[in-house]
Amino acid sequence: MPTGASLPKIAATKAYGAEVVLAGETVDDSLVEAQRYADQTGAVLIHPFDHLDIVAGQATVGVEILEQMPDVSTIIAPLGGGGLLAGVAAAVQASRPDVRVIGVQAAQAAAWPTSLAATRPVPAGSMNTMADGIAVARPGDVPFAHVTEYVDEVVTVSEEELSTALLLMLERAKMVVEPAGAAGVAAAVGGTLDLSGKVCVVLSGGNIDPLLLRHVTTHGLTAAGRFLTFTATVSDRPGGLLALLELLRDLGASVIDIVHSRVADDLYLGEVQVTVSVETRGPDHQHDVRRALSEAGFLREV
């Protein structure tokens, strides 16, 4: 596994009896090490996505979707190396070619748009996404052929959209989904896809570290306009901070955290700088809070 693999994923794999070797920063790096290990020891390498048997196995997901949702119009699945999407698309094409199949990549690890345009697998230039499960630099050769032939559309989603989707799954569906697993949801609710009829989104994983979950949740709240952090300047006299807190109370913004600092380059004698995190009800409410803070002379930066 990559060195950045989530601790729950590593621990669970070990608990099932496997030896875990951490190598490289990406899935591609780990595959190189896995092949080297297989060559040295005579072990059999089971590729995670670039093999017909793996694609065929993941095609059962498509078969089961059609069995359980015979009226489905669109299927959306995460896209990394391509095994899952290729299998689902091949299964759907075999019996229901009228069903749209859409693949979703993280925009900051998107090798597929470039590869499809070039009609061959092309390595991504950079990989910097929280969706480590689909952070594959180069599409697999076997999946590429299937995706090219059977998939209707490939789209990308931003880190903010991934965070918002993960938060949506937590709050509305009561499900813990890793960023890669939530990619399809991010695309479905992002507003860029033309969707009609019954839509099925494949949730492909729940391996997420609790610390990352906390970070992503905060990121998602911020993207949804429900979390705001700002730096304000208040009087260092008694009641100076109270005036700010009373304004936030009147605005209906709940204070989550506040940090004082009397040392800053732009502070005058008798001033205190405070960094405040508040919960807001959405983008409109957040805009009202910003405006009121500015009009009251508190706001330095957000």
Image (cartoon, rainbow, N blue to C red):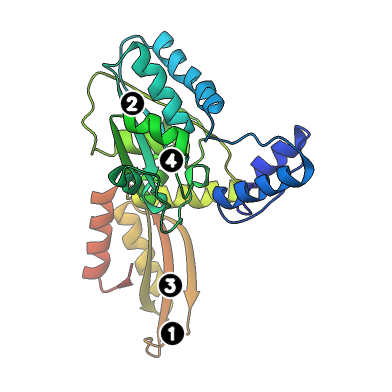
Circle nearer the N terminus (1, 3): 1
Mark 4: give few (<14), some (14-19) or many (20+) Cα within 10 Å: many
Q: CA distance from mark 4 to mark 3?
A: 28 Å
Helix, strand or loop status at disc 3? strand
Kindly identify which residue carries mark 3: 274
Circle nearer the N terminus (2, 3): 2
- Amino acid type, callout 4: Leu
Can residue 221 be spotted in the picture?
Answer: yes
Helix, strand or loop status at disc 2? helix
Circle nearer the N terminus (4, 2): 2
- Amino acid type, callout 2: Tyr
x and y percentages locating residue 257 in the rendered image: 48, 60
Query: Seen in the image, is 114 located left or right of residue 169?
Result: left
- Looking at the rendered image, the disc whose residue lies closer to the viewer, 4 or 3, is 4
Q: Residue at x 47, y 30 (%)?
A: 84
Q: CA distance from mark 4 to mark 1?
A: 35 Å
Query: Seen in the image, is 155 located left or right of residue 77?
Result: left
